[in-house]
Image (cartoon, grey):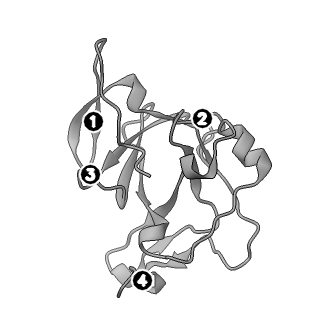
């Protein structure tokens, strides 16, 4: 479920933003993700642009704030690394992003990358749920106690490895 897929700009105005990884990026309003409540700790940040690190895959995405060019997050598709991940969205969270069907929800986790990859972590406890049709998003907190806010990236395994 690629949140970048299927969005072509059909007329209108292109906008630009600078990103620390990619430099100046042009984008259309239809590409942004809207977080009505912001992200935890960044509640004032409501609009972000997802920028894939590699074209055609949502394995790793830069989530760039459209209000603050200095603010971006690195997101990972958790299912590519942790095949048993089962976020289970609550009805309240589902309603907050427009009550999509399960197949229309994309989940991403925020990564914190350190110089030593073994010291890097991902937040499996508070994933980002995206309605792939409307592009409304929300960071949610899972009730399941097996997930942590700082899960070691070294513990995640790609399927088949």
x, y (%) of residue 12? 31, 11
Name which of mark 1 and mark 4 comes first in the sequence: 1
Mark 4 neighbour class, 10 Å CA radius: few under 14, some 14 to 19, many 20 or more: some
Q: Is residue 108 above or below residue 114?
A: above
| Element on which disc 4 rests | loop
Quarter residue 48 falls in = top left
Report x, y in % for residue 11.
Answer: 28, 13
Question: Does the residue at mark 2 contact the one at mark 4 (Cβ under 8 Å)?
Answer: no
Which residue occupies 49% across, 60% down?
110
Q: Find disc 4 in the rendering and name its residue.
A: 157
Quarter of the image with the C terminus is bottom left
**Gap in angstroms between the C-alphas marked 2 and 4:** 34 Å
Kindly identify the residue that appears in the image at 28 percent across and 19 percent down. 14
Q: Which mark is residue 101?
A: none
Looking at the rendered image, the disc whose residue lies closer to the viewer, 1 or 4, is 4
Q: Which residue is mark 3?
A: 56
Q: Secondary structure at mark 2?
A: loop
Q: Which mark is residue 44?
A: 2
- Choose mark 3 or mark 4, whichever is in front: 3
Q: CA distance from mark 2 to mark 3?
A: 30 Å
- 2 vs 4, front mark: 4
Q: Which circle's residue, 3 or 4, is located before the other in the chain?
A: 3
Residue 18 in the image: x percent, y percent? 27, 36
> Is 10 above or below relative to 88?
above
The residue under label 1 is 18
């Amino acid at each position: 479920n690629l949140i970048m897929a299927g969005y072509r700009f059909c007329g209108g105005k292109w906008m630009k933003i600078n990103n620390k990884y990619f430099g100046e990026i042009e984008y259309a309003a239809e590409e942004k993700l809207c977080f009505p409540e912001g992200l935890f700790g960044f509640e004032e940040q409501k609009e972000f642009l997802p920028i894939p690190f590699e074209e055609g895959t949502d394995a790793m995405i830069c989530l760039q704030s459209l209000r603050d060019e200095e603010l971006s997050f690195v997101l990972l598709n958790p299912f590519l690394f942790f095949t048993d991940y089962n976020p289970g969205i609550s009805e309240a969270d589902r309603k907050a992003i427009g009550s999509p069907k399960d197949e229309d929800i994309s989940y991403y986790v925020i990564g914190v990358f350190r110089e030593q990859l073994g010291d890097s972590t991902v937040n499996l406890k508070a994933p980002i749920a995206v309605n792939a049709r409307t592009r409304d998003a929300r960071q949610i907190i899972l009730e399941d106690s097996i997930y942590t806010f700082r899960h070691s990236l070294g513990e995640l395994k790609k399927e088949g490895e």
